[in-house]
Image (spheres, helix red, strand yellow):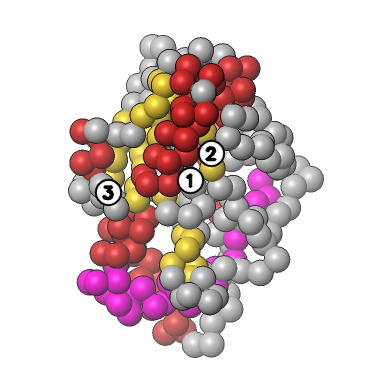
Amino acid sequence: LWGSELRDQPPKVQYDEVMHSEKGIREWTSKLVVYGMCYIEGCPVTPESTEQLLRRIAHIRHTHYGGFWDFTSNLASKDTAYTTLALRAHTDTTYFSDPAGLQMFHLLSHQGGSGGTSLLVDGFRAVQELKSTAPWAYEILSQKRVPTHASGNEGVSIRPFAPFPVLNHHPVTGKLMQIRWNNDDRATMDQWAEEKELDNWYDAARLWAEILRRKDVEYWEQLQPGTPLSWFSDEQYNSGIKSS
């Protein structure tokens, strides 16, 4: 588990080693397993090279956004990722039954602007803190199912086959295995046995959000052209970005 101290020595591998040796692949995937994220230094600053890099360890999943794509803050797609708004720590595609797992960002250009610093949070560390300080909140976020959806674009309306809790556990071992947390994807929460349940959920969610925003939990880094960032979004690690 890690926090802001990861900035002192973040996990990295070299692009040439990954592209030309099994040893490089092993080092990259090992660091992803241990840390849940890893930088790749020395990548040519093109979409084509970035796609080739990603295909070294994974297939590319096609969604309503496409497969592999590059974009900027132009609202070409009606999504907060296509704006200059600040994004707090969140996990992506909570509206999928099977959310996106391994993801990669490669900043191709950042000239004459401000903001855009990327945020990563070790969600399991945040859960550990929540469970130890507010076990009642941990239980609520583990039990109450939260409806989610994506419907900002014409012809697109996506929901999972069933609502999922924020904190999801393995059905056999009972161990925490997945975090689903995204305020922008949350749908109307109108299924409550009594009003007090509503108040309790929002109290728990507020505590959880406060932990995610703690300075010792947040790891901020300005991405650089030539150094893609790979990380697991749907399991342990939350991402975000500063506004410009």
* Residue 9: quarter of image: top left
The amino acid pointed to by label 2 is Gln
The circle drawn on residue 232 is: 1
Q: Whole-percent x and y of residue 187?
A: 59, 62
Question: Is residue 3 visible from the viewing direction of this image?
Answer: yes
**Do the numbered discs 2 and 1 sit on residues whose CB atoms are within 8 Å?**
yes
> Element at badge 2?
strand
Q: Which residue is nearer to you in this view: 142 or 227?
A: 227
For residue 18: magenta?
no
For image coordinates 26% across by 64% down, the residue present is 129
- Badge 1 crowding class, 10 Å Cα cut-off, few under 14, some 14 to 19, many 20 or more, is many
Q: Is residue 181 above or below residue 141?
A: above
Q: In the visual, does 152 lie left or right of 214?
A: right
For image coordinates 53% across by 39% down, the residue present is 103
Question: Is residue 74 visible from the viewing direction of this image?
Answer: no
- Dot 2 or dot 1: first in sequence order is 2
For image coordinates 51% across by 52% down, the residue present is 234
Q: Would you name the residue on which mark 2 appears?
A: 103
Q: Is residue 56 above or below residue 153?
A: above
| Magenta-drawn segment | 130-153
Q: Whole-percent x and y of residue 38?
A: 40, 35
Q: Looking at the rendering, in which quadrant would you find the C terminus?
A: top left
Q: CA distance from mark 3 to mark 1?
A: 14 Å
Q: Would you name the residue on which mark 3 appears?
A: 2
